[in-house]
Amino acid sequence: MNRLKLYAKQFHPVVWVLLGGTVLARGASFMTLPFLAIYLSSTMDLHPLLIGLTIGISPLTGTIGGFVGGYLSDRFGRKPVMLSALMMWCLVFYGFALADSPALFVILNALNGLCSSFFEPTSQALIADLTDKKYRMKAFSLRYTAINVGASAGPLLGAYLAAVSADSTFVITGTIYLLYGIFLAVFLARYKIKKTADPAKKGATFKESIRVVRRDKALLFLILGSILINFGYAQIDSTLPQFLENELANGIVVYSSLLSINAVMVVILQLPISSFAEKSQPLQVMMCGSVLLSLGLVCFSFTNGWIIGILAMLIVTIGEILIFPSSSIMIDQLADDTNRGTYFGASQFRKIGHFAGPILGGFLLGQTGGQIAFWMIAGLSLGSIVFYRMGNLVTVKAGVRSVEG
């Protein structure tokens, strides 16, 4: 019990609220959004390319909004940005339940991406603000684990609710975001979390922030590599469910199960893999992860049942565990206390891959049937190694190292 209390004291109470909220909110999101492609295909009979465009619009608006949201959180504080995003997110999911045309789904998913791009980098910046530097790697790993704890239950529950009433999943998700926002507001007020930057330091203007980020070559290479990684990873939410639905009689069941297996494996493997990753430079770890992610995508192209599907997901899972927490640590190391939100916001440009991935994936799926699509996308994702290698050379010269402890 004493060890548990000591462990809990490593992190601020607000950080624990963010982690707990992440479990519930991501669980709700994974209950709905992974099935959006199937929902649009079955209820509106859209072409795969149009489905890809609808799915991809969310990361496109996220790309645009991330930098702005991160800058605003540096300038005016984390609290107003985060709470506004959560309240809008709630309304977006209620809107999904009422939408009856493709255009409305495009607009709502665009707003979904905007809310995500404001909330996610700001919450990551707040976690870093409130956590001692030696515990930040652990905090980001816990956040990633929290995401996958929620994701482990979300798809299975979503598959069940989709069979009963697809619209109800959107309402439940919106309500969870509403409750998350209320609970977070109470704790932010209780601990008087307003502005996190030193009030004696004047925040940089928007133009100055753009200039700082643009000159950071390590950040640029990190973003370029991450665009290609997300290009491949986006197929799991868009191309893969359509591919499995076409190839397998029980494709939806297999897909939802694979998502839950992925989340459970992340929870189980996160600690041992992150302990190994802490001993190496983040960009080197991310290069290893990109190889595994690309290999997993190739394996998906041969999926004809449970065994190959699970093997492919296992490979992808190890790859993502190596990539995503290391990316957060890398951004935190490149930023300073006055522009951390801006840097985390700038990292949202990686969502260009999430926008382009579903569109090209949907096009290739319609033209080739799926297998060649996965091969081509795997090749593009593997190209991230080039940018990570260049970024690693920059960070080594600059003396940037992995966080110890």
Image: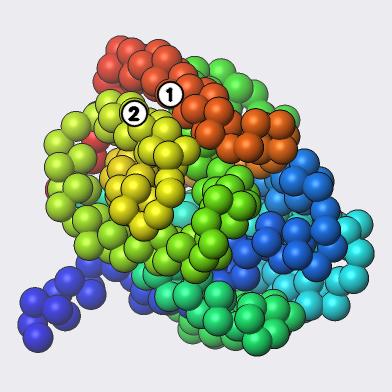
Whether 54 is drawn above or below 385: the answer is below
Q: What is the basis of the colouring in this image?
A: rainbow
In which quadrant will I find the N terminus?
Answer: bottom left
Q: Residue at x 71, y 31 (%)?
A: 367
What crowding class fits label 1: few (fewer than 14 Cα within 10 Å), some (14-19), or many (20 or more)? many
Quarter of the image holding residue 354? top right
Whether 387 is drawn above or below 70: the answer is above
Looking at the rendered structure, the kind of residue marked 2 is Val
Q: Position of residue 155 (x, y in %)?
A: 50, 70
* Along the viewing direction, whichever of 269 and 199 lies nearer the viewer: 269
Quarter of the image holding residue 335? top left
Looking at the rendered structure, the kind of residue marked 1 is Leu
Task: Evaluate whether residue 292 shows in this view.
Answer: yes
Q: Residue at x 19, y 47 (%)?
A: 273
Label 1 residue SS: helix
Image position of 405 (left or right of 18): left
* Along the viewing direction, whichever of 89 and 246 lies nearer the viewer: 246
Whether 99 is drawn above or below 321: the answer is below
Q: Position of residue 14 (x, y in %)?
A: 42, 73
Q: Residue at x 30, y 58 (%)?
A: 266
Task: Evaluate whether residue 84 shows in this view.
Answer: no
Label 2 residue SS: helix
Image position of 48 (left or right of 330): right
Q: How far apart in space, not on screen, are marks 1 and 2 (Cα)? A: 6 Å
Whether label 1 touches label 2, CB < 8 Å: yes
Q: Position of residue 295 (x, y in %)?
A: 36, 32
Which residue was labeled with disc 1?
382
Which residue was labeled with disc 2?
291
